[in-house]
Image (cartoon, rainbow, N blue to C red):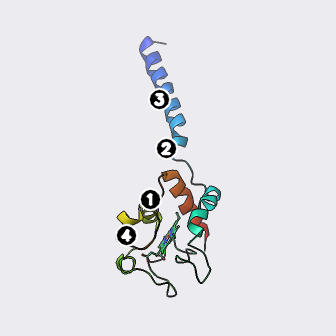
Amino acid sequence: MPIRSLIAASFCIAGSIAFLAGVPRLAPAADAGRGKTLYAACAACHSEKPDALGPNLKGVVGRKAAALDDFRYSAPMQRADLVWNDANLKAYILDPQATVKGNRMPFGGLREGRDVDDIVAYLKTLN
Ligand code: HEC
């Protein structure tokens, strides 16, 4: 085999190994089970109890912001004009005030993107 194609072949193999090794880190699957555990921090306020501090999050993915009749939302949340989806839920959980300025959720936000992904995966199971 000519030396040139040998070199080309080894680059190719090295490239594929790097690619394969990178894949699991690039796209870790969100873990709804882990999200359920983390959701304990949200469930302190978000539950189905009538006297809960926060609105019920059952079915929140795909729902309009501030859509529940039996919860008194803040004016900024009512004006937010959002339909909750992956992207805006993640942004809101990471930084509630930056996402819906002036809303009344007394929660500073989570730091870890992975935790947020897992919580959103869990929210999707609540229907
Ligand atoms: C200390 C209480 C508290 C905690 C903890 C809390 N929330 Fe909230 N949440 C609220 C309140 C109150 C509102 C309503 C805000 C408003 O009307 O401005 C709200 C609103 C929301 C909404 C909008 C719901 C809707 O019907 O539009 C989402 C989504 C949400 N919270 C997700 C979460 C998640 C996920 C967590 C955990 C990571 C969490 N919250 C933690 C109190 C809390």
Residue 93's place in the image compared with 115, above or below, is: below
Quote the CA–CA distance across marks 4 and 1: 11 Å
Q: Amino acid at mark 2?
A: Leu
Residue at which label 2 appears: 26
2 vs 63, nearest the viewer:
63
| Viewer-nearest residue: 26 or 115 | 115
Looking at the rendering, which quadrant does residue 58 occupy?
A: bottom right
- Residue 50, x across and y down, in percent: 60, 84
Badge 4 crowding class, 10 Å Cα cut-off, few under 14, some 14 to 19, many 20 or more, is many
Q: Is mark 3 within 8 Å of ligand 1?
A: no
- Where does label 3 land, which residue? 15
Which of the two labelled residues, at mark 3 and mark 2, occupies the earlier sequence position?
3
**Which residue has dot 4 on it?**
100
Please state which amino acid type lies under the numbered disc 1: Leu
Local SS, label 1: helix
User: Quick one: SS at disc 3?
Assistant: helix
Q: Is mark 4 within 8 Å of ligand 1?
A: yes
Check whether the beta carbons of the residues at disc 4 and disc 2 lie within 8 A of each other. Answer: no
Alpha carbon distance from label 1 to label 2: 20 Å
Q: Quadrant of the C terminus?
A: bottom right
Query: Looking at the picture, which amino acid does disc 4 mark?
Result: Val
